[in-house]
Image (spheres, grey):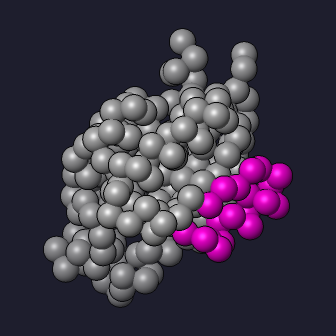
Amino acid sequence: MSKKRVAVLISGRGTNLQALLDAEQEAYEIALVVSNVPGAEGLNRARAANVEGIVLDHKSYGQNREAFERDLDALLIQHNIEIVALAGFMRVLTPFFVRAWAGRLINIHPSLLPKFPGTKTHQRALEAGESEHGCTVHLVVEEVDAGEILGQAKMPVEPADTPETLATRVLILEHDLYPRCLADLARALRK
Ligand code: GAR
């Protein structure tokens, strides 16, 4: 069975990208990494893994989000990409892109969705007095962080936790959860 060709979109350090690379298996291969931020640390991880890394700087498109996404879409098609995995990609996508990749576009988010969509999830979980926290892999739909949940990983919140300690522990869960969910989706799309 052929592996599904995955593009990972990043904006920063790329530890989830690293986890996806490290866990590559028969279900998928990371065929392309695209960063919207020049010099993102994740690009070095792509290079080290011999995966093509491309910068598509959203700033050169000004306010025109869709023009950025049309070029991104063309790039993905050129590379025969079948699944797009967002991994710390800090751009909200427009309906154009979300519709084009519906069912094949996934994201990892650092909270137990539907709780805490958006940013500052660890701080908000603490402020809300949550006893549990974690991360979610979900399909991307037009509403931010609202698509079908493909998997979650949970952990208890301890009395001494800070946003930083939560971020560190949740990230460990992310690195385990994301490759498993991506492989499950890749297998499901083969059928
Ligand atoms: C991760 O914690 C990821 O869940 C989060 O950004 C971090 C990226 O880290 N994503 C979001 O908040 C998306 N809304 P990484 O670059 O080391 O993978």
Q: Quadrant of the C terminus?
A: top right
Q: 181 above or below 10?
A: above
In the rendered image, the residue lying farthest to the top is 191
Residue beneath the point at 69% across and 64% down: 43
Residue beneath the point at 56% across and 58% down: 56
Residue beneath the point at 75% across and 50% down: 52
Q: For this view, does 24 lie left or right of residue 127?
A: right
Residue 106, given in percent of the width and then of the height, sits at: 44, 42
Can residue 16 be seen by looking at this rendering? no
Residue 81, given in percent of the width and then of the height, sits at: 61, 33
Q: Nearer the viewer, residue 158 or 41?
A: 41
Quarter-of-image position of residue 12: bottom right
Q: For this view, does 168 lie left or right of residue 148?
A: right
Task: Give the residues in magenta.
Answer: 37-55
Can residue 91 be seen by looking at this rendering? yes
Residue beneath the point at 64% across and 34% down: 78
Residue 134, given in percent of the width and then of the height, sits at: 38, 60
Q: For this view, does 14 lie left or right of residue 126?
A: right
Q: Quadrant of the N terminus?
A: top right
Residue 95, given in percent of the width and then of the height, sits at: 28, 41
